[in-house]
Image (cartoon, rainbow, N blue to C red):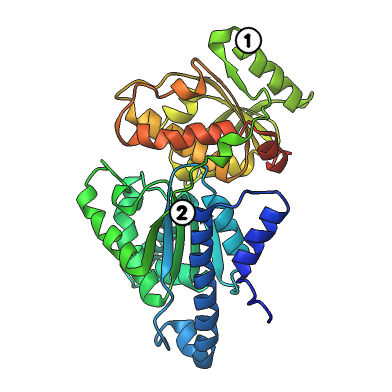
Amino acid sequence: MQQPQDAALLAAYKAKIERGEIKDDPAQRDIVGRLDAILEDVSTYRLASKKSALGWLFGRKKTRPSPRGLYVHGDVGRGKTMLMDMFFDRLPVKRKRRAHFNDFMADAHDRIHAHRQKLARGETRESDPVPPVADSLFEEAWVLCFDEFAVTDIADAMLLSRLFERLFERGAVLVATSNVAPENLYRDGLNRQLFLPFIDLLKRHADVVSLDAPTDYRLEKSRRLPVFHHLGQGEGEAGLDEAWKKVVDGRAVSADRIERKGRSIVVPRATSDAARFTFSQLCDAPLGASDYLAIADKYPTIFIDKVPEIKRGDRNRAKRFILLVDVLYDKRNRLFLSAEVPIVDIYATGTGTEKFEFSRTISRLSEMQDQAYLDASRAA
């Protein structure tokens, strides 16, 4: 008797095990099964919607409820990103988007800004920018995949409910991974009560599941390159200078500027594909996600001098550093840095949300020294 064929994602997962790329993990298999079910739902929903092409295009009629999404949360290094990548590659639709959450929200804010400028010029009469912005995002992608979903910016927190209420009304499907359960999103954030409706909205449109894999696969890797330099060991700044010299390779170094929304981001030292900053220039200045994205997009290699021990109470510094590392990691930038203390002690005295989130930063900084990460980086 012929055995039933494995679903697409499960077959790919088993193939990775057979090739020795990963170990079989029951917790991961559970997520694979859930993602395979979404692939099937999306496929049949798409086919059914084609019978009413105009209704599908303009969102006036839906032949059936849109598929439920999935929100997967768990500790760092448990394989969430790997599973997300496998899922996205097999999505049977063209209008799909996999994005870093900060990148997506920066795009939404840019579109809102552009709409308000059109309103000021008299080019539109629609005073509320959120519905048309949500509609334009939906028309480009109705399956949205966010890896490492995290909300730290008040502007994002205040926009999310209205933006996603419209997206879900149109039939959007959200699949996201995060290090925290929905209830802990934007924890301790300013005016958090205004953010809480988004959590309810998320749960109405996506199943929430924890990935309780026992192993941090990211930290199992052991190969390291000298990209982190501890100032306390004497060679820190000299070692970073030597790495900078090798990356520059005799090319001219000069100051640069990145123009963004009518203002300039100053880059103290740069070549065509590498930039060097001090910690203070990146994390004491009033920079946000869109600024870090602009820097990451322009320069594949980033150097950061003199990362300090972040003291209790320095929440803005901690939040900016966490955000900066998230952006550089997601964009696959190569990162060199010097620090006054070992990586694990940079925020050792902190408490609260930043201390909780810094565990992800430590894991990512560790992975960014791996040969595998460096081989896959944009600067490789």
- The front one of 162 and 193 is 193
Residue at the (48%, 66%) spot, across then down: 34
Residue 106 horizontal side relative to residue 368, left or right: left
- Please tell me the numbered disc located at residue 177: 2
Residue 7 horizontal side relative to residue 346, left or right: right
Residue at the (44%, 22%) spot, across then down: 346
Which residue is label 1 attached to? Answer: 235
Query: Secondary structure beneath disc 2?
Result: strand
Identify the amino acid type marked 2: Thr
- The front one of 96 and 159 is 96
Q: Position of residue 244 (x, y in %)?
A: 69, 22
**Which mark sits nearer the N-terminus, 2 or 1?**
2
| Whether residue 99 is situated above or below residue 153 in the rendered picture | below
Residue at the (49%, 16%) spot, across then down: 341
Outermost residue to the bottom: 51
Instruction: Bin the neighbour count of mark 1 within 10 Å (Cα to Cα): few under 14, some 14-19, many 20 and up.
Output: few
Identify the amino acid type marked 1: Glu
Q: Position of residue 288 (x, y in %)?
A: 43, 40
Q: Quadrant of the C terminus?
A: top right
Using the rendered view, name the quadrant where residue 298 is placed: top right
- Measure the alpha-carbon separation of dots 2 and 1: 38 Å
Outermost residue to the right: 250
| Whether residue 289 is situated above or below residue 108 in the rendered picture | above
Q: Quadrant of the N terminus?
A: bottom right
| Whether residue 13 is situated above or below residue 296 in the rendered picture | below
